[in-house]
Amino acid sequence: MLYREFGNTGEKVSILGFGAMRLPIIGKDESKINEPEALKQIRYAIDNGVNYIDTAFPYHYGASEPFVAKVLKNGYREKVKLATKLPSWDIKKPEDMDRILNEQLQKLETDYIDFYLLHALNEKFWKNLKEHKVFDFLDRAKKDGRIKYAGFSFHDELPLFKEIVDTYSWDFCQIQYNYIDTYYQAGIEGLEYAAAKNLGIVVMEPLRGGSIVKNIPDDIQKLWNMAPVKRSAAQWALRFVWDHPAVSVVLSGMNTMGQIDENVAAAREALPKSLSDEELDIIHRVREIYKSRMAVDCTACNYCMPCPFGIDIPTCFRFLNNAAMFQDVKDPKRVYDLQVHGDRRASNCQDCGLCETKCPQHIPIREKLKEVVEIFGD
């Protein structure tokens, strides 16, 4: 296992982190973790060098944190850096933050959290947390030893990311990044902006929720087969992220022993800037094939926004493209239903056409929104 410096913290973390969000479950109930199997898997990963374990308040409908406490008994807590997250959406008054953190310490059966994140920051959550004096809370929790380092995970656009980075003396951040999403949300520019501030950088969704490693089209597999070094689609995706020297740790939601072995093997070789020009070109060509399958040529420039009826047009199109690119409706629909609510959904279109007068790509937006409704429902 290779290890990297974690920003200016002085800590060294395994470049592969174990995400406890997609653990094996019993049946189809996400709240019922298959504890014997999941415990075996996480401890096996730790025994093979993984020292960054990531969980959060809502994972597995609240079951993840108490389960991680069981995993880290018998000396395993001392072998790892533990990360969990404050549920930003649940903060109604300043006292909620201390209360929730104290509950998490009890559930995790530990005296401190190594890496504590404000979870899933977007414009709404960020504004709410600032109003409730989140920085005083973080300073207090660091001072009294309940957390060692403070960070945030991010799900919004680049300007907000830069604002957040500049507002507090963060130790680290967590962003989505993979070879498809190089300009999505914080993207490569945000990654390098945070690195310039000496933040530790955690990358989530390196496999894009598994979409770039499942049901691989023949033309893409043909490109992978052309590479001088043979790797699985998952290893190619991980190696792309690890190739950036500013990335400290990449989270993977591993839930089979085979996935753990595969990822650990890749993590033993993934030095920064170790991919050749030929390998990087193959990754670029794979990216272009996926993008050629997009259902709508939306660049998320936001010129169509705001919609007078509240529809989040770029986000609706992103999910439509996900379904088309990866020939999978089920997972994009699940996330669409989870993240896009009320007026923001495509079904709220009133056919006014204002958006189409502002779109520089001349997209038939109303027609494409109807496709979103047809595929994902109302």
Image (cartoon, rainbow, N blue to C red):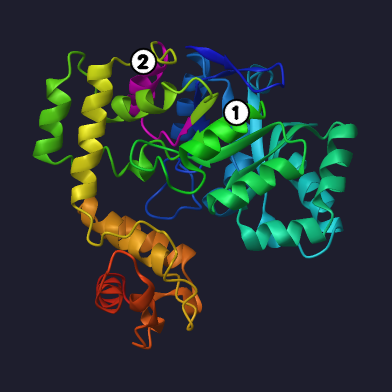
Residue 240 numbered mark, or none: none
Start and end of the magenta stretch? 251-268
Is residue 142 shown to the viewer in this render?
Answer: yes
For mark 1, what is the residue?
195
Is residue 157 positioned above or below 111 on the image? below
Which of the two labelled residues, at mark 1 and mark 2, occupies the earlier sequence position? 1
Q: Residue at x 41, y 48 (%)?
A: 26
**Residue 110 in view, yes or no:** no
- Amino acid type of the residue tagged 1 in the rendering: Ala
Residue appearing at x 29%, y 64% in the figure: 361
Q: Nearer the viewer, mark 1 or mark 2?
A: 1
Question: At which x and y percent is residue 197?
Answer: 67, 30
Label 2 environment density (alpha carbons within 10 Å; few <14, some 14–19, many ≥20): some
Looking at the image, which is closer to me, 96 or 312? 312
Q: Which residue is mark 2?
A: 265
Above or below residue 152? Residue 8 is: above
Above or below, 317 relative to 167: below
The quarter of the picture where the C terminus appears is: bottom left
Residue 277 in the image, given as x and y percentages of width and height = 27, 18
**Tags 1 and 2 touching, CB below 8 Å:** no
Q: Nearer the viewer, residue 172 or 166?
A: 166
Q: Quadrant of residue 248?
A: top right
